[in-house]
Amino acid sequence: MSLSLKTQGAATLRLLGKPFGGIGGAICGAGLGLFIFVALFAPLLAPYAYDAQDLARIGLPPSAENWFGTDEFGRDVLSRVIYGARISLSVGLTAVALSASAGILIGALCGYFGGRFDRITMAAIDLTWCFPEILLALVLVAILGPGLNSTVIAIAVAYLAQFTRLTRTQVRALKGETFVEVSRCLGAGHAHILLRHLLPNALAPVIVVAMLTTGDAILLEATLGFFGMGAQPPTPSWGAMMSSGSAQLFNAPWVVIIPGLFVALSVIFINVYGDAILAALDVKNRIRRA
Amino acid sequence: MTTPILSVTDLCKTFRSGGGLWRKPRQFHAVSSVSFDIQAGETVGVVGESGCGKSTLARVVLRLMEPSSGSIRFEGEDIAALPEKALRPLRRRFQMVFQDPYSSINPRLTIREALLEPFRVQGVSLTTAQEQDTVDRLMAMVSLNPVLAESHPHHLSGGQKQRVGIARALALQPSLLVLDEPTASLDVSVQAQVIQLLQSLRGQQTLTYLFISHDLALVRYFCDRIMVMYLGRVVEVMPKGATPAHPYTRALLESSFEPDPTQRRSIVRITGEIPSGYDLPPGCAFQARCPKAQDLCRQTRPELGSVGTRHQAACHFPDSPLPDTQTPRSGTAPSQETPHAV
């Protein structure tokens, strides 16, 4: 992105200055920042180790010693939620980064070169639309074997089609612009046209979709964790915690409700913040205002 | 006579569309057997109504589109046959100014970056000081305020953007400049400025222009020689100031207004529709709309033939300067256009 610092500064100001969406965006951005901070400094912030069992204190409700209560093995739920933030956020972010990078690469090549290569590749990519994301991810994890790496790959593949489609459409539309023809007339090669003219103009919406998809990816990771296909015990992830706690739903509901609350909060934060960024970074919007 | 800077022979461009497993694709003849020469330093105008193939001709001549057949010799080298990679370094010698100044500059680049792009693309490395000099020189050449160098295209007016387009095309000092309706999307007052700029640039450096326009009055004012196109074919080539011999050119000329009420005259309107480029009628392409069309015109397509000094027309019954206009011209090669499979 060749946004100048000045424009980015102006965008940030506009983000804060807007009366309603602006404040919401700022609060959600701050909330997201707090989650990331907690994930980064988990060992310093967690009051107990995430796998420390205390069989004398099984299924206790929230109290002064255990703010979020204890689970079926007497482990501190707060500590597990703090460590779980690491897994949930990093799996979500890594998977989306991987998916977006691959999607941008494939989509740009398909959109730019077109022809038979485009049709065959897109047909293969479109096959993944046929399955619901959760089913596709479950099948992939089942093939690759449960674990964090396969979870990341499965989530990346599940969202690959939307990034590829979006980039391809953007690049195809931009390919017809006069400035691309000008560049070709000057003697530019494919790499120059793609990297200098097409991608910088195509990426803004892709980045926004990547932000919004991160929320879905965290949810998908939680779902895979709930089915026991994600992080393996005793490693905590929010989804896995809800899964193992579901047996105690009526005795100790906090074991399920609290990780679920954090999944919901992070999805909300990411979506609202992504919307605010969409409004602030919209190229057309910027041109209209300038 | 010296070798022409650009020599185009029998250039054709056909687009295919539709077609399927069982149906043959339809062929659209955008440019059909166009031949012409341009001498160094000359300004040649191409006129015709929308859809007659003039923009396609410009793009095919510069190999922005692949020609279907024919040869394009630029300074003696056949650029129609070169592979794209070998052509790239040659591109600095022939440049183009595009019709739409609004989308001709990448919205994310500053004017300065846009003006330096030709050097980047052609691998000319410049020091920071040289870059500054180049940008200043190019902006001064097209009378743009150097303050604008750091602004983005959306801060500029249409006329200013078109100046940037001209400066960028001239950055690598090409010998041929193709202008594809450079004034069509500008206000009349701004049009005049751009035309004046092009005229003064022609005086300062040896430039050859191929000027595409639908405005016959403008082309008659600006160009040394005029090619009139109709349905992908050149129907008349005439020097500046000549009286048109082809009925189509005559009708075009009569449709342009004189800025003098005493010169007011009744307009002979061309009736009928332009035929489709998908299936061209046999005979003269203009016969359906021509006031003078006869049986011969409906059967045999007229070839370009001389009607005066450096003046050619593709008509069986050209108007003066030849006095005897009602008998078929001798030396016309009869050729039958084969109807195209649909």
Image (cartoon, rainbow, N blue to C red):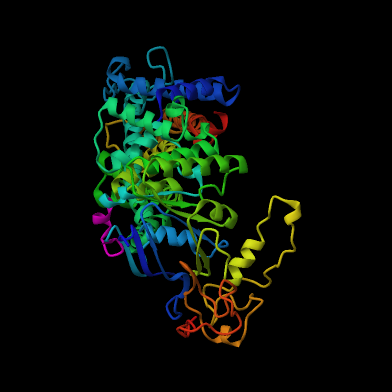
In the picture, the quarter occupied by the N terminus of chain B is: bottom left
Task: Residue at 45% x, 61% y: name it.
Answer: B56
Q: What is the span of residues highlighted in magenta in the rendered image? A: B77-88
Question: Is B158 on the left-hand or right-hand side of A80?
Answer: right
Task: Residue at 28% x, 26% y: name it.
Answer: B128
Q: Classify B323 as above or below A194.
A: below
Q: Return the x and y of residue B214 as percentages of the image width and height.
A: 56, 57
Q: Classify B323 as above or below B94.
A: below
Q: Nearer the viewer, residue A122 or A52?
A: A122
Q: Nearer the viewer, residue B25 or B132?
A: B132
Q: Return the x and y of residue A255 as percentages of the image width and height.
A: 41, 28
- Residue B272 appears in which quarter of the rendering? bottom right
Q: Return the x and y of residue B202 as percentages of the image width and height.
A: 42, 45
Q: Nearer the viewer, residue A51 or B202?
A: B202
Question: Is A173 on the left-hand or right-hand side of B248?
Answer: left
Q: Nearer the viewer, residue B155 or A214?
A: B155
Q: Return the x and y of residue B12 as percentages of the image width and height.
A: 40, 70
Task: Residue at 49% x, 31% y: name it.
Answer: A268
> Which residue is situated farthest in the top direction here?
A64
* Whether residue B18 is visible: no
* Whether residue A12 is visible: yes
Question: Is B36 on the left-hand or right-hand side of B130?
Answer: right
